[in-house]
């Protein structure tokens, strides 16, 4: 029987390769809530593949998927079969397949397969984060003004002062801001030292937990705080997380 980490590695790689093959063959897509919130037949097929493999290998575990899967269990796998679907269907490279395994104490492990460069990111509570087997670390402990920050801002939320004003307090500080369109890719890059910090609001568990496991297992820190009726998800070095939290909570 494979270990949890080996199982996670297998399902995200298989799902990512399936989705990539379906994109090459041609996709059927539809909207969810907006023009940028889309889903494709590859999202559904990749989620079915992951869920079937998890249910067969770990029948006692729960599974929660972005595309509607929901089973309860002693532990829970959170599944994002294609994270960054808008990029995926548009031919942009920043998308991945991601899973996290969570117990009562939090994330046990995360797995992210970044298909475009064949990078498999793995890490968890008992396993330091690696990219294709090479150990990686959250290396940047400089202040926010000297590093990059990955974030996201949806145009429809701009009239919401409870979102816009706290976000602008932070976005005005970094050396540069990057919005790549896939939270799990960004968090994996942060774990590997390619980005300095990360900030998003109201993240779904499948968008947050795989990357949390990678960042924490790479020596980084994470935090969730409520400001302006929104839950803000923060990752980076301990110094950076504390600085971003303070900026969000300042008045």
Image (spheres, rainbow, N blue to C red):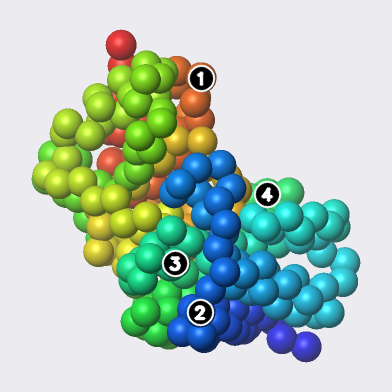
Q: Are marks 1 and 2 in contact (CB under 8 Å)?
A: no
- Judged by depth in the image, the label closer to the viewer, 3 or 1, is 3
Q: Is residue 144 above or below residue 2?
A: above
- Judged by depth in the image, the label closer to the viewer, 1 or 4, is 1
- First in sequence: mark 3 or mark 1? 3
Please report the residue visible at 51 percent of the width from the left and 36 percent of the height from the top: 202
Residue under label 3: 89
Q: In 3D space, how far apart are the residues under numbered discs 1 and 4 (Cα atoms)?
A: 26 Å
- First in sequence: mark 1 or mark 4? 4
Query: Residue 105 bears which disc, if any?
Result: 4
Q: Are marks 1 and 4 in contact (CB under 8 Å)?
A: no
- First in sequence: mark 2 or mark 4? 2
Residue 111 lies, in percent from the top left, at 54, 70
Q: Visible in this render: residue 216?
A: no
Depth check, front residue: 13 or 7: 13
Q: How many marks overall?
A: 4
Q: Visible in this render: residue 195?
A: yes
């Amino acid at each position: 029987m494979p270990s949890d980490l080996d199982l996670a590695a297998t399902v995200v790689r298989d799902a990512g390769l399936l989705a990539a093959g379906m994109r090459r063959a041609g996709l059927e897509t539809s909207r969810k809530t907006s023009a940028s919130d889309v889903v494709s037949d590859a999202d559904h097929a990749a989620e079915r593949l992951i869920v079937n493999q998890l249910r067969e290998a770990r029948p006692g575990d729960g599974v929660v998927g972005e595309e509607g899967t929901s089973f309860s269990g002693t532990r829970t796998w959170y599944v994002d079969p294609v994270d960054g679907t808008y990029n995926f269907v548009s031919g942009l490279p920043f998308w991945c397949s991601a899973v996290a395994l969570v117990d009562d104490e939090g994330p046990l492990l995360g797995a992210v397969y970044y298909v475009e460069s064949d990078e498999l990111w793995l890490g968890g509570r008992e396993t330091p984060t690696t990219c294709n087997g090479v150990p990686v670390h959250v290396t940047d402990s400089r202040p926010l003004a000297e590093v990059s920050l990955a974030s996201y801002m949806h145009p429809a939320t701009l009239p919401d002062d409870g979102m816009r004003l706290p976000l602008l307090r932070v976005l005005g500080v970094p050396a540069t801001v990057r919005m790549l369109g896939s939270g799990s890719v960004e968090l994996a890059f942060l774990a590997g030292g390619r980005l300095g910090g990360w900030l998003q609001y109201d993240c779904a568990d499948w968008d947050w937990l795989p990357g949390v496991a990678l960042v924490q297992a790479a020596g980084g820190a994470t935090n969730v705080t409520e400001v302006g009726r929104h839950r803000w998800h923060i990752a980076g070095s301990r110094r950076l997380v504390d600085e971003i939290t303070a900026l969000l909570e300042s008045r």
